[in-house]
Amino acid sequence: MDTRAPRRRVGRAERERQILDAAVAVFGERGYQNASMDQVAERVGVTKPVLYTHFGSKEGLLLACIARARAELLDVTSAAATSASTPEEMLRRGTLAFFDYLESQAPAWRLMYAESAVAGDAIEEIRAQQTDFIAALLAAQAPDAEPQRLTGWAQVIVGACERLALWRDRSGITGEQATGYLMDLVWTGLGNRAQSAR
């Protein structure tokens, strides 16, 4: 008589989450080019055909990892910004949430930037998403600014955040410090602009 407990059937959404978690770990440890679907399947405890059923290919799996990170990043930065009461605090909290997310999801972050040759379009979509989000925050500080100027400022902030994040990885500064550096530069300029408009 078999006394083992029956295996619990896992729903599609839960299985996909497990696969994405395993893929981020395996890709992060070995690099996308050196990682195999067999290694991801083994980490999850499924067969390789299950991975193909869910994501179609290794590249499809990488893109799904990046898409999940993109959605999570927008969620955390939006939630942080909406909890603020002033435009300055919105930008500060949203920026800190960005750095905190990158720290808590370090393997996914490193994967995105290490594999930009494979996933360049997906990474550009993340940049565009964050640019739109920041431009909307800036509109609250500078409601008279034309949309192109707001987008230009947002592009500068997104680029600065990316460079700060890469530097932060090597220098050991905190997310709070990186946020402070960004706000020192960005908010001073926006604050001066707002005062001169009065």
Image (cartoon, grey):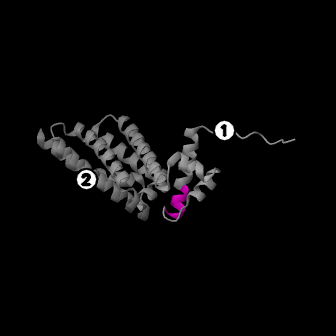
What residue do we see at 42% from left, 62% from top? 114
Q: Residue furthest left?
A: 197
Q: 10 Å neighbourhood of mark 1: few (<14), some, or many (≥20)? A: few
Which numbered dot is residue 156?
Answer: 2
Residue 27 drawn in magenta:
yes
Number of callouts: 2
Residue 189 drawn in magenta:
no
Magenta region: which residues? 25-31
Q: Secondary structure at mark 1?
A: loop
Q: Residue furthest right?
A: 1
Q: Is residue 123 left or right of residue 141?
A: right
Q: Could you tell me which quadrant the N terminus lies in? A: top right
| Mark 2 → mark 1, Cα distance in angstroms | 48 Å
What residue do we see at 57% from left, 39% from top? 12
**Residue beneath label 1, please?**
9
Q: Is residue 38 left or right of residue 196?
A: right
Q: Vertically, is 4 above or below 169?
A: above
Q: Earlier in the sequence, mark 2 or mark 1?
A: 1
In the rendered image, residue 180, in percent from the top left (x then y), is placed at 34, 52
In the rendered image, residue 95, in percent from the top left (x then y), is placed at 35, 47
Q: Nearer the viewer, residue 198 or 32?
A: 32
Q: 10 Å neighbourhood of mark 2: few (<14), some, or many (≥20)? A: few
Specify the amino acid type for callout 1: Arg
Q: Secondary structure at mark 2?
A: helix
In the rendered image, residue 144, in percent from the top left (x then y), is placed at 15, 37
Magenta region, mostly helix, strand or loop?
helix
Is residue 168 at least partly visible in the picture?
no
In the rendered image, residue 30, in percent from the top left (x then y), is placed at 53, 64
Q: Nearer the viewer, mark 2 or mark 1?
A: 1
Specify the amino acid type for callout 2: Val
Q: Could you tell me which quadrant the C terminus lies in? A: top left
Q: Nearer the viewer, residue 81 or 6?
A: 6
